[in-house]
Amino acid sequence: MYQYNSKNRLNSAIYSGLFLATLALTGTSYAAMPVSQIVFSNETPIALNTSIAGIPGYGIEANTSKPVGFEKVTMGCFWGGNMQNCGISFTNKANGQPVATVYINANTATLTQAPVFHGDYAAKYEVMGWETSPVTHITIKEKA
């Protein structure tokens, strides 16, 4: 039990340190972030893995939503090296195939282009919410 709690405290300390370093290096304050979170909704029958700028994130199970603090998006984009056109990728958890990628400007919380779908997924799914500025909700759903 003690070791588990120590690891949690260590992970929290590391995360806090990286977050503060990211804010310092980008010249951003937490209060100046364009949004507090983005809600990712997966309205498909497949579970999705996620990554921000190639850094693995938490997946989204089928037919669920997951709020993500915008500081995590900012941190991923900063450490991935591209704040203005940062890729958020979704892959099929079962087979690893790429499903879709959206590109966000982490400074403004706006998507920089239409979502890119990969392979057969383009015929099956669409992304909603990417047109809003700033982006607060991105939904991947089956086409009607």
Image (cartoon, helix red, strand yellow):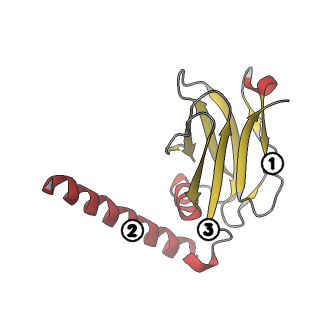
Which of the pair 122/77 is nearer the observer? Answer: 122
Sequence-earlier tag: 1 or 3 = 3
Q: Is residue 80 above or below residue 100?
A: below
Sequence-earlier tag: 3 or 2 = 2
Residue 103 coordinates in the image, percent (x, y): 71, 48
Q: Is residue 22 above or below residue 58?
A: below
Residue 57 coordinates in the image, percent (x, y): 50, 45
On residue 113, the disc is 1
Q: Which residue in the structure is indicated by mark 2?
A: 16
Within 10 Å of the Cα at label 2, are there few (<14), some (14-19), or many (20+) other Cα atoms?
few
**Tag 2: residue type?**
Ser
Residue 7, by quadrant, is bottom left
Which of the pair 127/105 is nearer the observer? Answer: 127
Residue, x 79% and y 50% (percent of image)?
129
What is the secondary structure assignment of the residue under circle 2?
helix
Q: Which residue in the structure is indicated by mark 3?
A: 36
